[in-house]
Amino acid sequence: MFEAYITNTALYPLMGIEVGTTVHFPMTTQELQAALAKIGIDGKRYSEVFFTSFDSDVLGLYDHLYECENIDELNELGHALLEVRDKGGLETFEAALVLGNHTRSVKDLINLTQNLDLYRFYPDISDDEGLGRLYADELGTIDIPEHIQNYFDYEAYGRDVRINEGGVFAPGGYVSAVPEGFKEYYHGPQDIPPEHRIFAYPEKAEPVHSILAALKRFQEAPPAPKKDKAGPSHEER
């Protein structure tokens, strides 16, 4: 569901170059250990893992993830997002990120995935007039006599609805949230299921001289740049 670039910053003073690799969440313990071993992290000489960047096909997710995140929590978030995707709720989650409530930590994001039923999301509604027509004509929130419908100010009505609800226009549509009722299902790492706990140092990491040799080969013959491609649709995720 998302990827991160992890680095062994302790090697930067020695090598003068960032030593890192890309990992994909959710993942297994074996996949994590292989990634840590690749950048020389063994839990003995080198033990600190930093995230220098995140990327995801979940729009806006990377804006809420930071360099010292807990790996097990990130993995739990990855599994939670898979469940949201399978239920067809990714657009609502993305819109909720734009709304900005409960997005300050990975803990918040995990809980957000479990509270999406509290969010009203209307796809393809991008302005106040469209919102006003949706509420008045389709949802029937106001009774407009037929003889004045052509003169009714749908834009002003939609603006009032948005202000009163505290809603926003997200990339995929309009979103607002129920003022109360958000529940905290996830309280911290202690709530992560055992099968989603993946952090473990590898038994043996790559020695520094091997990493130096690999970096030298990379600098001498870097791989061809990847071609840009359009991001996947929600149906393809």
Image (tube, rainbow, N blue to C red):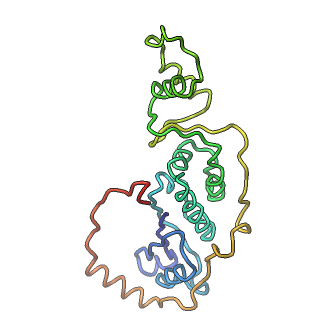
Relative to 164, say whether 122 is above or below.
below
Whole-percent x and y of residue 229?
A: 30, 59
Relative to 11, say whether 203 is above or below.
below
Residue at screen point 49% across, 36% down:
169
Q: Nearer the viewer, residue 208 or 118?
A: 118
Residue at screen point 54% across, 51% down:
89
Relative to 106, say whether 122 is above or below.
above
Relative to 169, say whether 47 is above or below.
below
Q: Which picture quadrant has residue 111?
A: bottom right
Q: Which picture quadrant has residue 29?
A: bottom right
Residue at screen point 25% across, 73% down:
224
Whole-percent x and y of residue 83?
A: 57, 61
Whole-percent x and y of residue 189?
A: 70, 67
Q: How many marks?
A: 0
Q: Going by the image, does 92 lie left or right of 223?
A: right
Residue furthest toward the top? 147
Residue at screen point 42% across, 91% down:
209
Q: Going by the image, does 127 lie left or right of 217?
A: right
Q: Nearer the viewer, residue 29 or 6?
A: 29
Quadrant of the image for the C terminus? bottom left
Whole-percent x and y of residue 58?
A: 48, 55
